[in-house]
C-alpha cells in the first residue's frame, strides 16, 4: 500500500533531536587531583521532532531531564552526544565550531522562554534595555527604529508602551513573563522553547499567559517546544506530547490518544495524579509507588521497573526501546497496558 | 520625603555615635594615668613645682569631667588641642600626616578594585578550574599573611637584594630621584602601595568571585546567552553590574578602615602618615594626638558606613524604608 505523498514543507520537521545525551562526571577529590568515578546521565538517548506551527510538550517530574533537554538545544548546556538539526542545519556543530554569524542565524530561529521570570530578567536593566539588547546583537533594523520595535513588542504581549522605562521589580510575575516572551520574540523566531513558562506564576495568571502563547502561535505561526509538569496546560497547548522519566522518553505521541489511553504505566500514574477540580469527586489517584530513583543510581534495565506495577523479569535487565506502537505513537515498555 | 527623614535620622545617629566614641576615647586615655607624671617619672631632677606648673599649663589640674567637656567643646570647633611633643596644633598635624596616608591608601584601593574585578570575574567564569584554584589560594594566602611580613619581604627583595626601591620615608633626604619631587614621591610610594593593594586585592577578589559565581548561574545570564550575546559582553555588561554591588559596598567600608590598617603599613615603611604619627604618639604618650587621631579614625569609619547606607538607598529603589 502506498503512503500518500505529502509536500516536503509539511512533512519535514523544523527541529529534529536524535539520541541526545547529556552526562555529568561524578568526581571525588583525591589528594592532588579529582578522580572521575562515574557519570550521571541527566538525559539519555532522547529523540523527538517538532514540526512547523505545532507544539510538542515534554512532561515529567522535576529532575527528569526536561530542562536539560531544552537547554541543550540552544547550547546553554553543551550536549555530550547526539544530533540536533534545525531545518537540516547541524545545531550542535554550528554552536560548537561554526562561525558567529551562523550561530546568530540559528538563534534568530530558536528562542527560549524561562521558567522563573524573577530570575530571568536583569534586575538592574530597564525593560527598554532588556529588549534592545537582542535588537542590537542581531542588528534588527536601524538603531533609530528600535524604540518603535520595542513598543511594538510590548503591544504584542499585551503591555502598554509606557512600561518600557520601568525596572523588572516594578512588575508582577505575569507581567514579567510577558516581558520575557517579548524578549524572545524580538528576533522574530520560528520556534520558542518554553521551559515551564507558567509554573512559577499564580494560578489566576497562568491562563492569561497560556492564552497569550496560543494567540501568538495563531498570529505568528510559531512552533513551541513546551516543557511542563502541568498536564492540564499541556493538553490545552499541544498536539503531541513526550513523557520523560529519568532522562529518557518513555512514551511520545498524540496528546488526546495518550491522555485518554496511556500505554506506559508511568504515564498512567502521572495522569491519575491530575487533581480534578470537583469537590464531590473522591480522589482516586493511585500515583506511583515510592520515590523516583536519583539519576546517580539509575536502575539497570527499564528505568521505571523499580516502581512499575506490571514489571516483568525482563524489565530488570533490558532497557526497552522506544518503538512505534500505533501510528504517531511510540512507546518504551516491555509490558504495556 | 521618607528619604529625607531617613537621611536626617541616619546623620543624627552618626552624631550620637561620635559623642559615645569621644566618651570612650577620653576616659580610656585618662585611665592610663596622668601623662605629665608618667613622662616626668623617667626624667630625673624635675621638681614637684615644675610638674605642678606643667599640669596647670595643660589644664590637667581640673577634674576629668570638666576636662572632657572642655575637650569636647573645642572638638566641635575642630580644635584638637596642641601636641606635647611637636608643640603644634594637633589639627594641622593630622591634616599634613593624614594627606600622606591618603596618598598611599587611595591608589592602593583603586588598584585593588581594578585587579579584583578582573581576576575575580575570570576565576568565576572558570569555576573549579586550575585558574580558579590558583586565584582562590593566592587570595586566601593574601588574607592570612601577617601584614608586616609581606612588607618586610618586599623590603628584603626590592630594597636590600636588588636595591631598586626605597624602603622608608616619603621622599629622599639627599637629592630627589631624577631631580624631581614628583618622581621621587611616586618612587617612594611603590612599596607601601603594593603592600596595601595586595591585602585589599585579596579580600575584594574573593568577594568579587563569589558574587560573580552566583550571578552567572541566574537565568537572566542564560537568557543573554540564548540571545546570542558574546560571552565577554554577557559577563562584563550583563553580570558585572549586578555582581559588583556588594564589592562596592565593601569598598565603602574599606575607605573607612584605611586609617585602621595604616599603623602597621606605615610603621613597616616608616611612612610619615597618620598611622605612623599615631603609633609614635602612643609610644611618647602624646595624648592630644592619640585622642585627636582616634576621633578622626572613628569619624572616617562612621562617615563611610553612614554614606554607604544612604547611597544604597539612593541607588537601589527596592530597599524599602520602614
Image: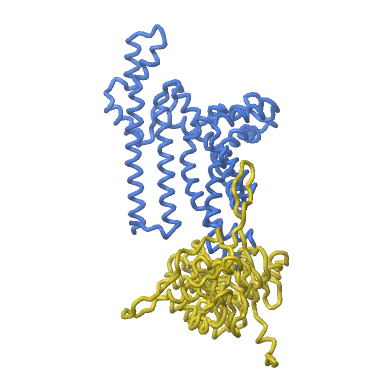
Q: Position of residue B118 (x, y in %)?
A: 61, 49
Q: Residue at x 51, y 76 (%)?
A: A154
Above or below, A99 against B79 in this view is below
Looking at this view, is B282 or A27 the one in front? Answer: A27
User: How many labels were placed on the picture?
Assistant: 0
Outermost residue on the top side: it is B45
Above or below, B48 against A92 in this view is above
Chain that is yellow in the image: A
Q: In which quarter of the view is residue B38 placed?
A: top left
State how the image is colored.
Answer: by chain
Outermost residue on the front side: it is A313
Q: In which quarter of the view is residue B68 placed?
A: top left
Q: Position of residue B310 (x, y in %)?
A: 41, 51
Q: Position of residue B281 (x, y in %)?
A: 45, 24
Looking at this view, is B57 or A29 the one in front? Answer: A29
Above or below, B19 against A269 in this view is above
Q: Is residue A67 visible?
A: no
Looking at this view, is B289 or A248 the one in front? Answer: A248
Picture colour for chain B: blue
Q: Is residue A103 left or right of residue A292?
A: right
Q: In which quarter of the view is residue B282 placed?
A: top left
Q: Quadrant of the N terminus of chain A?
A: bottom right
Q: Is residue B24 left or right of residue A218?
A: left
Q: Position of residue B99 (x, y in %)?
A: 52, 35
Q: Is residue B251 visible?
A: yes
Amino acid at each position: 500500500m502506498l503512503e500518500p505523498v505529502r509536500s516536503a514543507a509539511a512533512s519535514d520537521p523544523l527541529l529534529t533531536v536524535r539520541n541526545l545525551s547529556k552526562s555529568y562526571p561524578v568526581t571525588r577529590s583525591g589528594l592532588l587531583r579529582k578522580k572521575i568515578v562515574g557519570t550521571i546521565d541527566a538525559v539519555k538517548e532522547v529523540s523527538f521532532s517538532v514540526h512547523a506551527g505545532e507544539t510538542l510538550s515534554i512532561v515529567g517530574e522535576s529532575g527528569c531531564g526536561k530542562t536539560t533537554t531544552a537547554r541543550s538545544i540552544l547550547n546553554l548546556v553543551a550536549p555530550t552526544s547526539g544530533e540536533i538539526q534545525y531545518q537540516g542545519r547541524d545545531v550542535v556543530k554550528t554552536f560548537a565550531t561554526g562561525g558567529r554569524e551562523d550561530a546568530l542565524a540559528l538563534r534568530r530561529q530558536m528562542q527560549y522562554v524561562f521558567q522563573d521570570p524573577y530570575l530571568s530578567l536583569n534586575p538592574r536593566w530597564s525593560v527598554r534595555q532588556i529588549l534592545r539588547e537582542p535588537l542590537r546583537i542581531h542588528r534588527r533594523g536601524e538603531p533609530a527604529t528600535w524604540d518603535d520595535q520595542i513598543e511594538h513588542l510590548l503591544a504584542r504581549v499585551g503591555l502598554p508602551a509606557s512600561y518600557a522605562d520601568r525596572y523588572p521589580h516594578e512588575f508582577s510575575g505575569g507581567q514579567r513573563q510577558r516581558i520575557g516572551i517579548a524578549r524572545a520574540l524580538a528576533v522574530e523566531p520560528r520556534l520558542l522553547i518554553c521551559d515551564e513558562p507558567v509554573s512559577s506564576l499564580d494560578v489566576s495568571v497562568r491562563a492569561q499567559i497560556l492564552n497569550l502563547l496560543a494567540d501568538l502561535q495563531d498570529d505568528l505561526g510559531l512552533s513551541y517546544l513546551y516543557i511542563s509538569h502541568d498536564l492540564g496546560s499541556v493538553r490545552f497547548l499541544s498536539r503531541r506530547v513526550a513523557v520523560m522519566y529519568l532522562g529518557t522518553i518513555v512514551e511520545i505521541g498524540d496528546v488526546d490518544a495518550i491522555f485518554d489511553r496511556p500505554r506506559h504505566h508511568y504515564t498512567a500514574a502521572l495522569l491519575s495524579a491530575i487533581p480534578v477540580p470537583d469537590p464531590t469527586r473522591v480522589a482516586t489517584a493511585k500515583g506511583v509507588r515510592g520515590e523516583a530513583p536519583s539519576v546517580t543510581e539509575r536502575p539497570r534495565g527499564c528505568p521505571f521497573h523499580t516502581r512499575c506495577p506490571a514489571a516483568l523479569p525482563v524489565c530488570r535487565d533490558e532497557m526497552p526501546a522506544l518503538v512505534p506502537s500505533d501510528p504517531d505513537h511510540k512507546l518504551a515498555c516491555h509490558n504495556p497496558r | 520625603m521618607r528619604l529625607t527623614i531617613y537621611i536626617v535620622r541616619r546623620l543624627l545617629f552618626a552624631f550620637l555615635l561620635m559623642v559615645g566614641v569621644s566618651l570612650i576615647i577620653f576616659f580610656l586615655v585618662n585611665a592610663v594615668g596622668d601623662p605629665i607624671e608618667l613622662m616626668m617619672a623617667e626624667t630625673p631632677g624635675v621638681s614637684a613645682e615644675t610638674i605642678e606648673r606643667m599640669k596647670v599649663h595643660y589644664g590637667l589640674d581640673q577634674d576629668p569631667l570638666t576636662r572632657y567637656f572642655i575637650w569636647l567643646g573645642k572638638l566641635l570647633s575642630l580644635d584638637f588641642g596642641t601636641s606635647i611633643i611637636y608643640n603644634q596644633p594637633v589639627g594641622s598635624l593630622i591634616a599634613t600626616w593624614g594627606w600622606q596616608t591618603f596618598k598611599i591608601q587611595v591608589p592602593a584601593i583603586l588598584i585593588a578594585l581594578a585587579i579584583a574585578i578582573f581576576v575575580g570575574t575570570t576565576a568565576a567564569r572558570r569555576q573549579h578550574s586550575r585558574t580558579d584554584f590558583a586565584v582562590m589560594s593566592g587570595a586566601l594566602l593574601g588574607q592570612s599573611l601577617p601584614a608586616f611580613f609581606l612588607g618586610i619581604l618586599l623590603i628584603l627583595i626590592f630594597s636590600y637584594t636588588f636595591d631598586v626601591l626605597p624602603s622608608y620615608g616619603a621622599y629622599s633626604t639627599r637629592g630627589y630621584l631624577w631631580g624631581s619631587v614628583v618622581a621621587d614621591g611616586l618612587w617612594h610610594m611603590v612599596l607601601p602601595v603594593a603592600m596595601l593593594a595586595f591585602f585589599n586585592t585579596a579580600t575584594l577578589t574573593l568577594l568579587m568571585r563569589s558574587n560573580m559565581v552566583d550571578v552567572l548561574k541566574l537565568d537572566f545570564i542564560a537568557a543573554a546567552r540564548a540571545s546570542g550575546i558574546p560571552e565577554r559582553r554577557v559577563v562584563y555588561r550583563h553580570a558585572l553590574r549586578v555582581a559588583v554591588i556588594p564589592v562596592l559596598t565593601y569598598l565603602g567600608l574599606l575607605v573607612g578602615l584605611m586609617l585602621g590598617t595604616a599603623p602597621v603599613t606605615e610603621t613597616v615603611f616608616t611612612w610619615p602618615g597618620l598611622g605612623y604619627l599615631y603609633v609614635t604618639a602612643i609610644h611618647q604618650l602624646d595624648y592630644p594626638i592619640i585622642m585627636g587621631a582616634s576621633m578622626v579614625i572613628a569619624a572616617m569609619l562612621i562617615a563611610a558606613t553612614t554614606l554607604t547606607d544612604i547611597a544604597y538607598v539612593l541607588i537601589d529603589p527596592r530597599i524599602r524604608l520602614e
